[in-house]
Image (spheres, rainbow, N blue to C red):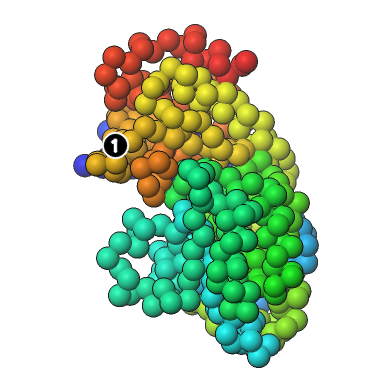
Amino acid sequence: MLPVVSHAEGVFVYDQEGRAYLDGCSGAINVNLGHSVPEITARMREQLDQICFSYRTQFRSQPQIDLTARLARLAHGDLHQVEYCNSGSEAIEMALRLATLFHARAYRPFKCTVLTEEPSYHGMTAGALGASGHPLRRRDLNALLANQATVARVRPKNGALRADVDDWEEAITRVGPSRLGAVVIEPVGGASSGAVPAAPETLRRLRELADRHQFLLVADEVMTGLGRTGRWFGCDHAGIAPDLMVLGKGMSAGFMPISALLVSDKVAQALDHPLGSLLFGHTMSGSPLATATALAVIDYLQDNDIPARAARAGERLRLLLAGLNRRHPLVRDARGVGLQCALSLQSDPHRFPGTSLELTDIARQEGLLIYPAGVTPVLESVMIAPPLTVTDGELDELALRLDRALTRLTPRAPATDAHEILSAGRS
Ligand SMILES: Cc1ncc(COP(=O)(O)O)c(C=O)c1O
């Protein structure tokens, strides 16, 4: 049975029994600033006392106006219009609706196929799950996922973990550019692949192909966005700007539900302007409280130069994980970008997913929270993605707890040797 949570501070979460858990996966890889950050909660309290909710068809709000301007400035390209939702899944749905409308209004209604990768994960609502290359989560739900006829998938070949340029080009030819409306891609994989990045040249080539064949390039930055990978956005590693960008998770760092769809001028201008009335939305979308919270989070990220800090901490974390890889035969590989990292695990195809769930459970017993990932035995992994504010000492402690969990799971594993484990992080 799961422990009952009591309170949290920084990278530690406490249960009602008084046990401390080091949050090695930032909750669901969203608590990017750690828990209970006074700078954020004070700003939330200020907003609570002014107004929590106003309806988007009746009022704009100052936090929302400021947040839109800030996001538009931070993102590359001309992603100037921002629409708000409450979860990553909802914002993906909005991206799918917008891509479909974009082509329909330009008298290209047949350009309605959405191409996504397997592995990928884009959310749990019907459209987003239907677009996800995540057979485990889609299993037995095909009757509900009405968009299966308009979703096509690209799969990596030759044992690769992500599709490369050739795989994408082949898939685009198979679908036919005249039918292809949008490509949705995660710059760095999350729950589906366990932190496997798309190669920067793949993203750059997709940008070129999108322009040539008039499909929209949609970056799912729900996990990668706002500093997680050591840059503001995952696409920044490839130096490209998508036509639509989806943000969630780290946007409010776990303090409030909020997500966003950033829309390029090209798309916005081809449709009604502003888009709000066209896209419809959700009751709570972009409330003053949620947008004020996200604005406080972005202020904190900027004031403390958090993306750069995540890049440095990520380097140290990967060295520590590589050390664990050398010590434990159960670990296949250590990988990731910034603080979106994972250990890939040896897995038994007959009891998949097994190892990642077992390791997650044992790690919790050792006082460490990690996140199971991977849609196939070859991708079975656990994500290690602590808050972007994690200190060197906390990273060391994370590695020691993870080593103890791996040792408990592996027969004849080496005894925990703190010196060996920690010196890997300094090499
Ligand atoms: C890349 C990606 N897209 C979309 C989602 C869905 O977001 P939410 O859980 O907020 O609906 C997730 C959640 O894990 C995700 O990692």
Residues 135 and 11: in front is 135
Q: Which residue is painted at 40% across and 41% down in the image?
A: 378
Task: Kindly indicate the quadrant of the structure image that contains residue 111.
Answer: bottom right
Q: Using the image, determine if residue 348 lies above or below residue 254.
A: above
Residue 241 picture location, percent across and down: 73, 60
From this view, report whether residue 384 is shown above or below residue 392: below
Measured as percent of width and height from the top left, residue 132 is found at: 45, 62
Q: Can residue 45 be seen in the rendering of this structure?
A: no
Q: Which residue is mark 1?
A: 348
Where residue 198 appears, as percent x and y from the top left, is 60, 48
Please tell me in which quadrant of the rendered image residue 107 appears: bottom right
The residue at the point 71 percent across, 78 percent down is: 268
Residue most extreme to the left: 1
Residue type indicated by callout 1: Asp
In this rendering, the count of numbered labels is 1
Relative to 359, residue 147 above or below: below
Compared across the picture, whether 139 is left or right of 83 comes to left
Q: Nearer the viewer, residue 343 or 392?
A: 343
Residue at the spot 72% in from the left edge and 55% down from the top edge: 204
Q: Residue at x 36, y 42 (%)?
A: 377
Tag 1, which secondary structure?
loop
In the image, is residue 155 above or below residue 286? above
Q: Residues within 10 Å of mark 1 (few under 14, many from 20)?
A: few
Residue 427 location (% of width, % of height): 62, 15
Quadrant location of the N terminus in the rendered image: top left
